[in-house]
Image: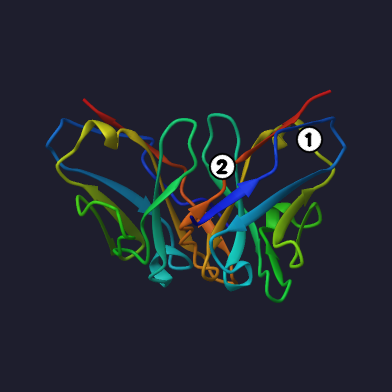
Amino acid sequence: QVQLVQSGAEVKKPGASVKVSCKPSGYTFTAYYTHWVRQAPGQGLEWMGWINPNSGGTKYAQKFQGRVTMTRDTSIRTAYMELSRLRSDDTAVYYCARDEGWEGAFDIWGQGTMVTVSS
Amino acid sequence: QSALTQPPSASGSPGQSVTISCTGTSSDVGGYNYVSWFQQHPGKAPRLIIYEVSKRPSGVPDRFSGSKSGNTASLTVSGLQAEDEADYYCNSYAGSNSVVFGGGTRLTVL
């Protein structure tokens, strides 16, 4: 079964960092880009960026430049998204999603990871 | 880049058709044939229902169709069913290897 499994919910204080993992199964990890999308409570979807698991190349949305880092560990077939200097408005569900490239056709999604930023 | 523009809400009765628009610019929707649509039920992850403007992934009913004219893409849901009630999001390739989403449309089946 093709799926993406994400790490569990996190609660962080303002100014801290959070690192969310995304582990695929049922397909070749390095054959698809891993994108990250977030959704604040009651709000819409927001694209954050992608990582090419094969090369390690990344592209970040301008809004998150300097605060987000996307990495991967091919030995354990896992992608990561780290967001630093957290603020209360970073409270959201963070999703990883699969795409053949960077065109936005996300055909497989993780279950989502709730990140709560609160003092 | 700015988010694509979608109407906040749409509605229709069972069996009817409803169309949801997604307006961008020549730098995103109008410039590429890479518009996708997603359906999201409450508390669930989004599901891809249309990609490359009008293609349907395997398993998506043909009641869902997509099109594009200029800078505006559209999703049409025909033969509305109760289970179609959900939030719908468009996205588009926006150049420079980036993607932009629309604000989302809540579809209500009356």
Which circle, 1 or 2, is nearer the viewer? 2
Q: Depth check: give the residue in front, A90 or A4.
A: A4
Taking the spot 84% from the left edge, 32% from the top edge, the residue there is A14
Q: Secondary structure at mark 1?
A: loop
Determine which residue is flagged by label 1.
Answer: A87
Q: Depth check: give the residue in front, B74 or A1.
A: A1
Determine which residue is flagged by label 2.
Answer: A111
> In which quadrant of the rendered image does the N terminus of chain B lie?
bottom right
> In which quadrant of the rendered image does the C terminus of chain B lie?
top left
Q: Chain of mark 1?
A: A
Is disc 2 on the same chain as disc 1? yes
Q: Specify few, some or many for label 2: CA neighbours under 10 Å numbering under 14, 14-19, or 20 or more.
A: many
How far across and down, in percent of the image, does residue A65 sit?
A: 76, 57
Lower sequence index among marks 1 and 2: 1
Alpha-carbon span between mark 1 and mark 2: 23 Å
Taking the spot 12% from the left edge, 36% from the top edge, the residue there is B15
Q: Across the whole image, how many numbered discs are drawn on residues?
A: 2
Taking the spot 56% from the left edge, 42% from the top edge, the residue there is A111
What colouring does the structure picture have?
rainbow
Q: Chain of mark 2?
A: A
Vertical placement of residue B14 versus A49, above or below: above
Q: Specify few, some or many for label 1: CA neighbours under 10 Å numbering under 14, 14-19, or 20 or more.
A: some
Give, as a three-letter code, the residue at label 1: Arg
Give, as a three-letter code, the residue at label 2: Gln
- The reply, left or right, for residue B95 in relation to residue A30 is left
